[in-house]
Image: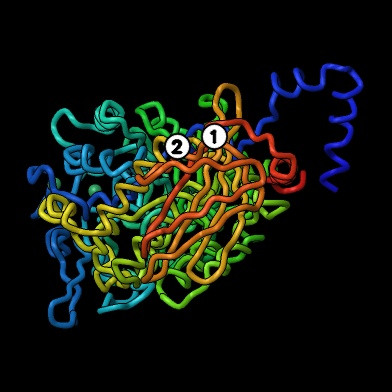
Amino acid sequence: MTAKRLLPALAAALACGLAHAAVLSTPPEFVGTDAPFAANAIYFVMTDRFVNGDPSNDHRNQGGAHRTFDIPVAGAPKGESANIGYLGGDFKGVLDNAGYIRGMGFGAVWITPIVDNPDQAFTGGDPVSWGSKFTDRGKTGFHGYWGVNFYKLDEHLPSRNLDFGQFTTAMHQAGLKVVQDIVANHGSPAFSMPVRQPQFGQIFDKDGKLIADQQNLPPYKLDPVRNPLHRFYHAYDDLVQLSNNDDQNPAVLDYFVGAYEQWVDQGADAFRIDTISHMSTTFWKQFAARIRAKHPGFFMFGEAFDYSPDNIGQYTWPSSGSISVLDFPLRGRIAEVFEHPGSDYAQLLDRLYLTNGPYQNPYELVTFYDNHDMARLAASDDGFIDANNWLFTARGIPAIYYGSETGFERGKAEHEGNRNYYGQQRIDAAPNSPIYRQLKRIASLREKTPALQRGLMLPLHFAGNQAAFYRVYQKGDTHQIALVLLNKGDQPTEFDISDKLQSGHWQPALGGNAIDVTAGGNLRTTVAAHGVQVYLLDATATRPDFVAELTRLMEDRGHPVD
Ligand SMILES: [Ca+2]
Ligand SMILES: [Ca+2]
Ligand SMILES: [Ca+2]
């Protein structure tokens, strides 16, 4: 198949008698993705839980009988804790640590939703207890996902001279892009309150006017025909007690396009879309088109909390708005591999979907091992180091949840410490963690290595504790071939690579000696326990079987046109 594809080009080149010159002057493009955003690794911060940079916006007395600040979850085992109140983190806390995040090798920060959330703790739903799931009674909007006015900043976030626009400007000056976490599927908890509470179940417009109100009614009691304030919502429930925005109502689409355009105008660089699978692809296609009409190429990735590649893949296709997604299917395998020392690297292979897969482009997926909605990775320090070495060299855009750089609250789910306050002290002490030091090493390498960011990925050898693959970026004046060697074992291990290995002067990117490979030769080297080595060859791909394989990867990298 490959040979057939190459033959016409070769035949044409030979026929014109300029074969050599023509091939050398116009090497083929080998690119995983051209999306500029894919150059950045992402650091994900739950803003309220990162750093309290300004106590003056804490609103510690907010909420009256249903106060919102510092609400510990009852029933914690000795030495553990969780909290469902606000804990003070804000824009200033993120900005104060822009240098810390940038210095680790990240190019973007994803922050939790910035829009106004209710000013009381919720009194409906099921009570939160230690380790409970889908429970909201007693919880506040510290996480930001309970919007009531999507045009207005929540009062806990800005400081004097640091509104959202000033925040993004300062972050950009510090070399960081800002990923805004957006919600359109739902507002706040909207029913089951013993007594109706202000803001819950309500939505306000740009001018502060009430435009939707569930009035504490169960969804089936909503009357959108006669009550204009019910028209924003579906008359059936979706996620716990959250209002369920009507994705068929054009006014809902208009509201969210308007709100999120406002924040893009204030400097948001990309969107992470919450609960994307809870709204129709028709909604998202229109939403994306309207945002990108003003901001061409604007990068978005959705959260479809689903381990089925076909289910999440659909969002990436043009017919659904060309929105990338968080790579849940790969994350499942990443947890299996890096939480268990005896695991086999081969488990990762069939979730990469490098050719003819379910994704429009697998190189644009946002890859991760945990976040705020699942238990943090339950790995040893070495497991984290191995996971990071994988994430920052394999295909995709890595996203690291705050605190993972020190193994913070590892293994902990929501209401067990997953979302605990990190704080300046832990940040200042992070360089003492071996996870931090190795993460910084590999993230800084990705940051300066186009092949690792956006290059094609060609797996060579995945078995036991070893993984070996090429990453290749060849376009315009940039040509870079990377050979990545990963060892997740407790002992140093030898790699002996000859498959499709191009001759030349291979430079080690992480220390060590350069290796000269002769035509048909091999590259033999030892990689330390829980180590990574990347050899770089600054050359265009010329070895015929290598070029043939890269050509195949390039032609088939995306989903077949739908
Ligand atoms: Ca604060
Ligand atoms: Ca608020
Ligand atoms: Ca919904």
Mark 1 and 2 residues: CB-CB less than 8 Å, in contact? yes
Please provide percent x and percent y for residue 359. 65, 51
* Residue drawn 25% across the image and 54% down it: 436
Reading the image, the residue beneath label 2 is 449
Kind of residue sitting beneath label 2: Thr
Residue at x-position 32% and y-position 78%: 132
Q: Residue at x 21, y 37 (%)?
A: 99
Q: Is residue 474 visible?
A: yes
Secondary structure, mark 2, is loop
Q: Is residue 453 in view?
A: no
Q: Is residue 562 above or below residue 67?
A: above
Q: Which of the two residues, 399 or 80, is positioned nearer the viewer here? A: 399
Image coordinates for residue 440, horizontal then vertical, percent: 29, 47
Specify whether 444 is left or right of 3.
left
Position of residue 89 in the picture relative to residue 37 (left or right): left
Q: How was the colour assigned to the protein in this rendering?
A: rainbow
Is the residue at mark 2 in contact range of ligand 1, meaning its CB lies under 8 Å from it? no
What label does residue 480 carry, if any? 1
Crowd around label 1: few <14 · some 14–19 · many ≥20 (10 Å)? many
Choose between 46 and 462: the one closer to the eye.
Answer: 462
Q: Residue 522 shows which numbered tag?
A: none
Q: Residue 264's quadrant in the figure?
A: top left
Q: Is residue 190 above or below residue 99?
A: below
Q: CA distance from mark 1 to mark 2?
A: 8 Å
Viewer-nearest of labels 1 and 2? 1
Q: Residue at x 35, y 28 (%)?
A: 266
Observer-nearest residue: 114 or 494? 494
What amino acid type should be assigned to the residue bearing mark 1?
Answer: Gln
With respect to residue 228, does 152 lie above or below? above
State the image quarter where residue 108 is shown.
top left
Q: Which x, y percent locates residue 166?
A: 24, 27
